[in-house]
Amino acid sequence: MRLPSTIALWGGALSVILVIAGASAACGQPSRYEPQSPALTEPPPATTAPAATDAVTATPGVQAPATPFSQRVYDPNLTMYGIWDGLGHDSGDSLAALEDTVFYDDKSQAYVILEALKFFNLDVARAGLDTLTELTGEDFDFDRRRWREFVGAREEEYAPPSDYGRWKVNGLSVIDPEMAALLEPGISSSRVNLTEVVWGGVRVDGIPPLEHPPHILPEEAAYLLPDDRVFGVSINGEHRAYPLRVMNAHELANDTLGGEPISLVY
């Protein structure tokens, strides 16, 4: 009489195990990161870099990322958008993309990381700097100027992904939408190197320029001291002095001199 009850007991336990196993299989694992940029609705053609399985075979002892890309061939553009793709970008996605950058030794992400550093939290920024060290063999810590000088001197070796122009303009437009309109022509222009465009810390026209400032005679400039410096400009027989003390606060003056439009930048 005990045999049936024993079978029933084990059968019930087996059912519980099967239910738990089924639930685990249904949950699965989330993807490492899904690019959110509209520019990647139709991903650009993949590069000819080796697939993840080939990379593991070619490098014994190196483990592939725990959850590799869904695509069979590595694509630097997808990694770029995984590193950062706008406000609210998931830090876990950034870290996963940085891991892929190291695994595939993707030097094209150097400029991407340098540009994205200002948007990262401290932990992701540190991971980004560690990634730069892996790619370059250098360690300049948070000195972005030195990083840019090093990478910029080796432009061909660290050339960014093909969609970098669009990615960068979209990123700068987060700071100020007017930057997108200002830099949009540079995306398709071979004369503009967007890797050299660096945000100066203010929005467009955050420092108001002098627009056709009023002029006075030298003897009327009582606010100037004898040793104050000025920028002297002469065009078509007309002469004008722009005091450094004034230019220092504006950095740009638009004016007309000798019948010609001029822009004085300091």
Image (cartoon, rainbow, N blue to C red):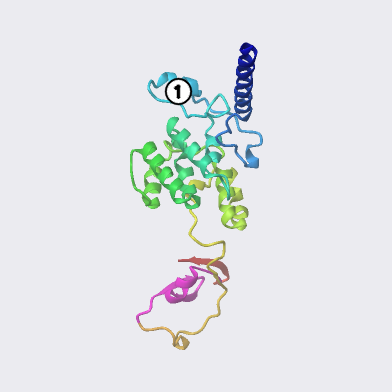
Q: Measured from the top left, where is residue 113 in percent x and y?
A: 46, 44
Q: Measured from the top left, where is residue 42 in percent x and y?
A: 66, 34
Viewer-proximal residue among 239 and 155: 155
Residue 66 to residue 40: above or below: above
Viewer-proximal residue among 59 and 252: 59
- Asked whether residue 237 is drawn in magenta, I would say yes
| Segment colored magenta | 227-255
**The residue under label 1 is which amino acid type?**
Ala
Query: Can residue 193 be seen from the camera position used here?
Result: no
Identify the residue position indicated by label 1 in the image. Answer: 55
Q: How many marks?
A: 1
- Asked whether residue 6 is drawn in magenta, I would say no
Furthest residue in direction front, as rendered: 1
Residue 183 to residue 231: above or below: above
Determine the residue positioned at 58% across, 52% down. Answer: 183
Q: Measured from the top left, where is residue 218 in percent x and y?
A: 45, 84
Q: Secondary structure at mark 1?
A: helix
Determine the residue positioned at 60% across, 17% down. Answer: 10
Residue 109 to residue 23: above or below: below
Viewer-proximal residue among 22 and 224: 22
Determine the residue positioned at 48% across, 59% down. Answer: 200
Residue 122 to residue 1: above or below: below
| Quadrant hosting residue 75 | top right
- The quarter of the image holding the N terminus is top right
120 relative position to 259: left or right: left
